[in-house]
Image (tube, grey):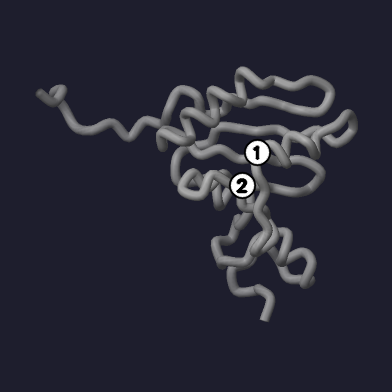
Amino acid sequence: MAPPGPASLDTHAAVGMQATFGVRRDEARLALLKTLADAGAIDLVATGNGRGWAYDRGRGLFQSDRNGETATLDALRALAAPGSELTFAAVPAGSGRRMAIDRDNDRFGDGTEREFGTDPTDPTDFPR
């Protein structure tokens, strides 16, 4: 039997939770975030050193902000070091791609746009 009332539009309570790697390694928290992302409750993103990655649960890989570039979770953890910290964060389901890798939603990653000299915040300005 379904609960009474309309379906909730609330976001998951874990949204905003972060796990930072570099100086320390928060393996337990990252494992929880990945479990929630695999279940579709949240999107999981990683940011650091001017780069962004969004977790693609269907492929089990992180898509970077550069078109065609992916990384495994282990590869991202290996990038983190003191002075080059990497933060994994829970964001609302459905918003990870926009928040971490393609803010203007023009299908060109923010990193790709920066490399080509186009504006990652302007959907009408993209690599030709």
Residue depicted at x 50% and y 24%: 14
Tell me: 13 left or right of 113.
left
Q: Is there CB contact under 8 Å for labels 1 and 2?
A: yes
Give the amino acid at mark 2.
Phe
Q: Where residue 67 sits in the image (x, y, percent)? A: 65, 64
Residue furthest toward the right?
Answer: 83
Q: Is residue 121 visible?
A: no
Residue depicted at x 13% and y 26%: 2
Residue depicted at x 73% and y 71%: 118
Residue for badge 2: 62
Residue depicted at x 46% and y 36%: 38
Q: Where residue 6 sits in the image (x, y, percent)? A: 19, 32
Q: Is residue 37 visible?
A: yes
Tell me: 3 left or right of 24.
left
In which quadrant is the N terminus drawn? top left
Sequence-wise, which precedes: disc 1 or disc 2?
A: 2
Q: Residues within 10 Å of mark 1 (few under 14, many from 20)?
A: some
